[in-house]
Image: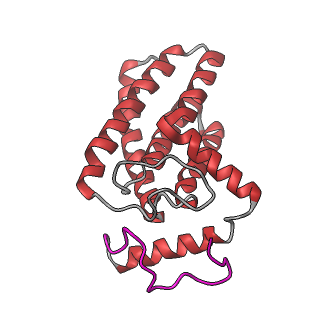
Amino acid sequence: MTDPLSPISDDLEVPGQGAFGPAVDAFDRRIDELLEHLRGNPVADKLFTTASHVGEFSMIWHAISLGRGLAKGRRDQVLLLAILIGAESLIVNQGVKRLFKRTRPTADGEDGLKVRRPMTSSFPSGHSSAAAFAATMLTAWDGKRLGSVWYTVASIVGVSRAYVRIHHGSDVVGGFVVGTLLGVAGRRIARQLLPA
């Protein structure tokens, strides 16, 4: 871990930088500097490492969907969301990521924070995309009050990927954009297939 009080040098070579130009590189460095102030804090380390783990394969979203579906008697929504999350993952991981092939900032994540080693491109973040997608879908069904909860969870999952240094900050933002756009399409599909 670097000294949190010293800014990361513009000259520091980070894999994946240069892919989208100097403005994005500066954004990524700034995000990493901000997160570096938190790294090493036991509570933050636990929160973001756990968020990164439960975001794998959208486990957290399937668990939330199952819980709310059983509580509301909407098992049809559980099944549809599972299918749509699968489609979203396929589009992002086998489609969008192949267009960019961006190198990740680290191969194995931040020292001391154990995360799974991903095999796909860094851009966009699949965790972030799935999180934004699921939050968009769940908010359409649950309304804005619960939607604020879903988007908060989505934000923590997304930021966790930059925190553990498996993604650049811009990967996370890109994932949120892609996931939101796919979520809007998913909402339209849901309106066609499921009764209100």
Residue 90 or 137: which is nearer the viewer? Answer: 90
Q: Position of residue 181 (x, y in %)?
A: 37, 46
The range drawn in magenta is: 1-19
Q: Residue at x 67, y 65 (%)?
A: 39
Pick out the residue farthest to the left. Answer: 99
Quarter-of-image position of residue 86: top left
Q: Position of residue 103 (x, y in %)?
A: 35, 62
- Left or right? Give the position of 103 relative to 4: left
Q: Position of residue 48 (x, y in %)?
A: 64, 52
Q: Residue at x 43, y 22 (%)?
A: 80
Q: Position of residue 47 (x, y in %)?
A: 69, 50
The answer to whether residue 196 is visible is no
The answer to whether residue 123 is visible is yes
Residue 113 or 130: which is nearer the viewer? Answer: 113
Q: Residue at x 42, y 48 (%)?
A: 118
Residue 22 or 6: which is nearer the viewer? Answer: 6
Identify the main secondary structure in magenta. Answer: loop
- Left or right? Give the position of 191 relative to 44: left
Q: Is 164 placed above or below 88 here?
A: below
Quadrant of the image for the N terminus?
bottom right
* Residue 3 drawn in magenta: yes
Q: Residue at x 62, y 16 (%)?
A: 70
Q: How many marks?
A: 0
- Left or right? Give the position of 97 relative to 55: left
* Residue 174 drawn in magenta: no
